[in-house]
Amino acid sequence: MPCLFKKLFIRFIFMSGLSLLFLIVGAMALAASEFTFPVRRATGGGQIMTGGSYTVVGVVGQPDAGQLSGGSLRVNGGVIGEAVVTPQDPILAPRAYLPITWQSYPQWLMLDEEEPNNLFNQANLIPSLPALVSGSHDGAAGGGDVFSLSLEAGRILDVSLFTEDASGVQLLAYDAAGVEVTRDYSDPFRLAFTTSYSGTFYVYVFSDPEAGNTGSYTLTIRAGDPLPGLDASVAPTMDAEHMNQPPHVELTP
């Protein structure tokens, strides 16, 4: 009898150890592999999202360990969210709690600068943000490239210029009346300001004719969400004569 009990005890220990081993290996495989499951409900960032599917990449429960499939959304860590798993296998019915924040990453608008665009009324329209514009400086002809965009009041406009040749280059912004808002005349070029009204704004990539600069450049334009509680001013207007002129630029040494 003691011998039988000993055999049963050894078998129990062996089976328990084997089950524990399978459980550990399975958990490691689950954490390290990529898999997809449908999301019935997910919360994060103050929003409730339904439908779609969730793909876990890397270690489950870690920041950045996942993404939504089939959309322009992805997951970052920082907010405790919940994804309710509905697996096909009815034996496995886990409830996964993942630290997730649902964030939208809008696609960048890719544009090429088009001539003529030296005057206010020739401005290349930027229809949406964020935008990335590829262009080239005007060489001996000088002047520059004007871009226009429409923004709501209270948005922080952020403009950066990356150029292969900074000779004679300035980056400027103007309001709807053609009045300079801000500028940067040293490389690396960057502008940032809060819009005070809802309406048109202009961005100007200027190149001095004396520099003869024909280098290529990339212009990035983006804007934050409108700031709450801002008393917006009335949008200024530009007369027809001003519209037929290039933006005014003060040359710097």
Image: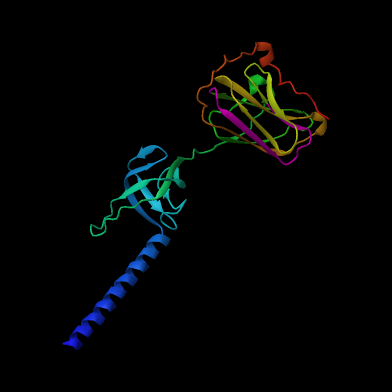
For the residue pair 244 and 185, the one nearer the viewer reads as: 185
**Residue at point 38% right, 45% down?**
81
> Considering depth in this image, is 176 or 42 the residue closer to the camera?
42
Instruction: Return the x and y of residue 152 as percentages of the image width and height.
Output: 53, 23
Instruction: Tell me which corner region of the image, top left, top right, bottom left or bottom right, holds residue 108.
Output: top right
- In which quadrant will I find the N terminus? bottom left
Among all residues in the image, which is located at the extreme front?
A: 2
Residue drawn where x is 71% and y is 28% of the image: 183
For the question of whether residue 72 can be seen, the reply is no
The residue lying at 53 percent from left, 21 percent from top is: 230
Q: Is residue 49 visible?
A: yes
Question: In which quadrant of the rendered image does the C terminus lie?
Answer: top right
116 lies left or right of 103: right
Query: Is residue 163 covered in magenta?
Result: yes
Q: Identify the image quadrant of residue 15.
A: bottom left
Q: Position of residue 170 (x, y in %)?
A: 74, 31
x and y percent of residue 145 in the render? Answer: 68, 28
Q: What range is drawn magenta here?
A: 152-172
Q: In the visual, does 48 lie left or right of 253?
A: left
Q: How many marks can you see?
A: 0
| Residue 72 relative to residue 217: left or right | left
Q: Name the colouring of the figure.
A: rainbow
Q: Above or below — where is 198 with respect to 37?
A: above
Instruction: Establish if 214 lies above or below 38.
Output: above
The answer to whether 117 is drawn above or below residue 31 in the figure is above
Q: Position of residue 4 (x, y in %)?
A: 18, 86
Residue closer to the observer: 152 or 166: 152
Q: Is residue 91 magenta?
A: no
* Residue placed most toward the observer, 144 or 82: 82
